[in-house]
Image: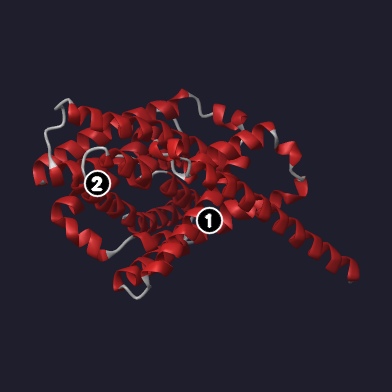
Amino acid sequence: MTTMAQAASQIWKDRFNGVFFVALFALAVTQFASVDFVSTLGLSPLVIGIVCGMLYGNFARGTMSSDWAAGVQFSGKRILRVAVAMYGLNISIQQIVEIGLPGIVVSIGVAVGILALGTWLGTRFLGLDRDLSMLTAAGSAICGAAAVLAFESTLRSQPHKSAVAVATVVLFGTISMFLYPIMYQLGWLPWEGQALGIFIGGSVHEVAQVVASASSIDPMTTEVATIVKMTRVALLVPLLLIIGLWLQRSTATSEGGRGKLPIPWFAIGFLVLALINSAGVIPAETLKVLRAIDIFLLTMAMTALGIETQFSKMKQAGPKVLLLAAVLFVALFVITSSLVWLVA
């Protein structure tokens, strides 16, 4: 009995050490992300976390005790779900109402259109598996790395597939972040003010990339673009619920009988916290601290994901994923532009 207790104690100790290691790693990543040069590039701690984690996991993992692997996996799965739920504290109904019907229409059109298009193209034409296609599409359609993490948890996909999807977000999100302000200065984007903000918020991948891109134009564009982007983030909940129902139906069809509905509790938590935030019952200073904690937890999850990702597995995805992400990048521009012309 004593031996069993000691074994259980050792398991929890190893898990704690693994989580603590990831937390220290994420803290270093957060400090690096706050450096002026890095922050001006629009690179969030999430993106830097997965890149640094991958470098460590592939070239220096031997310096970490193998017994800590359970803690790393815990960070990439359990802590991830808590962090995605807490992300709801960044959303409020008031923000969504503020931009009115045009922003809502563009957000829904982009999120649903890109997610459906990416999944269809990836599976039907490029021969990619379902999970990789959906993860890549989700990163483009909704909110970059955070969406990839949320979909990974619902789909229960392999970590290296999420890493590949996040890599496409980094590449094409960064391109759009620099490209659209240049196009605006050259007069190639025919919008101003609110319409321009809706376009940027609807077409750029990451929240940080949206802010970096719009802030190089003017404050009004930045405000509108950020709200539109957060409206796309809010669509994470209904889309995850729809995906859950779709997975249930697919399971029932392939295995017979009624499939089990994989209810994403973290998505429900996301919605609840968004409603609490909308009610304005959380003091501003407390809310600021909670949001900072959430970003740190997301950074931990991304870092853990990177550590668990092997370059050899990423290579198996091949150039088809990059092609899918490139097509979605163009589709983002076309769909968002068309919707802005129609409603803004």
The answer to whether 99 is drawn above or below residue 321 in the figure is below
Using the rendered image of the protein, determine whether residue 308 is visible from the camera's viewpoint.
no
Which circle marks residue 297 in the picture? 1
Residue type at numbered disc 2: Thr
Q: Earlier in the sequence, mark 2 or mark 1?
A: 2
Residue 222: assigned label: 2
Per the model, the C-alpha gap separating discs 2 and 1 is 26 Å
In this rendering, the label closer to the viewer, 2 or 1: 2
* Residue 69 position (above or below residue 3): above
Q: Nearer the viewer, residue 159 or 283?
A: 283
Callout 2: SS:
helix
Q: Nearer the viewer, residue 93 or 160?
A: 93
Residues at marks 2 and 1 touching, judged by CB atoms closer than 8 Å = no
How crowded pointer 2 is (Cα within 10 Å; few <14, some 14-19, many 20+) is rated as many
Q: Residue at x 64, y 36 (%)?
A: 56
The N terminus - image quarter: bottom right
Give the quarter of the image for residue 12: bottom right
Q: Position of residue 331 (x, y in %)?
A: 26, 33
Q: From the viewer's side, name the closer residue of 14 and 227.
A: 227
Residue 227 appears in the figure: yes
Nearer-the-camera pick, 91 or 124: 91
Kind of residue at disc 1: Leu
- Asked which quadrant contains residue 324, the reply is top left
Dot 1 falls on a residue whose secondary structure is helix
Label 1 neighbour load within 10 Å: few <14, some 14-19, many 20+: many
Q: Residue furthest front?
A: 36
Coloring applied to the structure: secondary structure
Q: Position of residue 180 (x, y in %)?
A: 25, 32
Total numbered circles: 2
Q: What residue is rendered at 38% in x and 62% in y?
A: 88
